[in-house]
Amino acid sequence: MTETLHPLDPAAQPSQQSLGTAAARNLATTTKSVPQMQEITSRWLLRVLPWVQVSGGTYRVNQRRSYVVGDGRIDVDRSGSQSRVIAGDLRELAFLREFDDEETLGALANLFAEETYAAGDTIVEWGHAEDRFLVIAHGRVEQHAAGQYGEEAVVGVVADGDYFDQWGLLEERIWDFTARAATNTTVLAVRRADFQNLVERSPALAEHLRAFAESDAGNRDGEKPIELSAGHTGEVELPGTFVDYQDAPREYELSVAQTVLRVHSRVADLYNQPMDQVEQQLRLTIEALRERQEHELINNRDFGLLHNADSRQRIHTRTGAPTPDDLDELLAKVWKNPGVILAHPRAIAAFGRECSKRGIYPANVDIAGHQVPSWRGVPVLPCNKIPVSDTRTTSMLLMRTGEADQGVIGLHQTGIPDEYQPSLSVRFMGVNEKAVISYLVSAYYSAAVLVPDALAVLENVQIGL
């Protein structure tokens, strides 16, 4: 009788005739990648900005004397049952700049009354008297005006914090547009009669307005005018003039992003092949610093582009999603040699959807060997550092770049001690009692907008899903 072996019995298994792969790889050198990091992005802003050497650590932007201050918006407190104008922000009005009577500003803020409108309601109508000044507390308002042949067109869109029209408080004027609520809207309004009564009761305010009326007309235009004469014939007396400069021009100090990189000496000594551990640790640390640098150039409250765009250079989308019409309006704000548009990748996708709806297919342009989308020949580059709000809205930036074009520039300083990359240093800090090696990694940078019309922002961009 022949004995049958169970299949799992070792005697039933065929004998191994060669070395197995599991054992063999213990003696083999694996092919491996350098450490990867998902945080790394294209960082287009750092690529397209022209970097200017700032040897003294501070860059001063000398400009022609200008009277434009603030962010051009009046903040509204909506924490209570009724919205309320922030009194100090009333200094955004041209005729209240440098007015320091807090009590009078508070009294003026109390004069504002809340009004609500449904979408489609008319707030002010063309041809009627400007009998009140309005601040948009919440919502979006479209400004319509009649064309030469009676057709109506949208000439502007305003939203939270915007206002119209301050000059109607000082003199009798007629509305030259019709304002309609595009969404459910809350506005705060003060009537000219109430404002004039306050002027009569406040000698300080009356004197301030009198001085304003007698001051240079440049207050309304933003810059002190240069007197010129043109089109004359014969021997006429030419006007004398000079170009006035700002007494206290803005200065940008280089900002810094820093960290201390720590590597144990045992790792650096024994595990340094085939890859240099210190070099790889340093490479990824620098990548993170550069990502933070781009974030700061966009979002920093002091020098970030989103916070340094002039109020006159900020516009709102007409319908929420970014349309070709919106980008054309943005280009009209930086019409002198526009350089690049920066947008969150989801905003670019939303713009692409709007183009597809209209049967428009924007062309690509080549930048440093990369094919990127464009609009009217201006590259549209992704930047995930532009924030997206909880309501799925974001912003798009358009800028002109370079000192020669009075544009936006990056600031840095090369040649610093222990420089590892331009304006980035890696400084050895020593070895502590636990045999840990420390390196101080520092990146120095900032950005400057040389003239206001070098940068424009499209706000309230709805990105959809």
Image (cartoon, grey):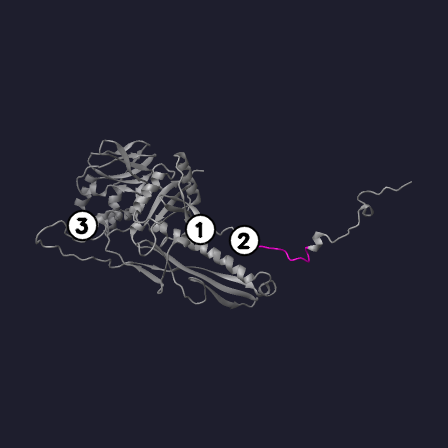
360 to 47, vertically: above or below: above
Q: Quadrant of residue 85?
A: top left
Q: Are marks 1 and 3 in contact (CB under 8 Å)?
A: no
The residue at 80%/43% (across/down) is 7
What residue sits right under mark 1 in the picture?
A: 369
Q: Is residue 212 visible?
A: yes
Give the magenta range.
25-36
Using the image, determine if residue 212 lies above or below residue 189: below
Q: Nearer the viewer, mark 2 or mark 3?
A: 2
Marks 1 and 3, the one that precedes in the sequence? 3
In the picture, measured across the screen, residue 21 lies left or right of residue 162, that is: right
Q: Which mark is residue 36?
A: 2
Q: Which structural element holds mark 3? A: loop
Picture layout, residue 2 above or below residue 32: above
Q: Secondary structure at mark 1?
A: loop
Circle 1: residue type: Gly
Secondary structure mainly formed by the magenta segment: loop
Where does the image place residue 363, in percent across and percent down from the top left? 40, 42
Label 2, label 3: how many angstroms apart (C-alpha)? 59 Å
31, 205: nearer the viewer? 31
> Element at badge 2?
loop
Q: What amino acid is at disc 3?
A: Ala
Circles 2 and 3, Cβ within 8 Å, touching? The answer is no
| Residue 391 screen position, x and y as percent | 41, 40
Residue matched to label 3? 217
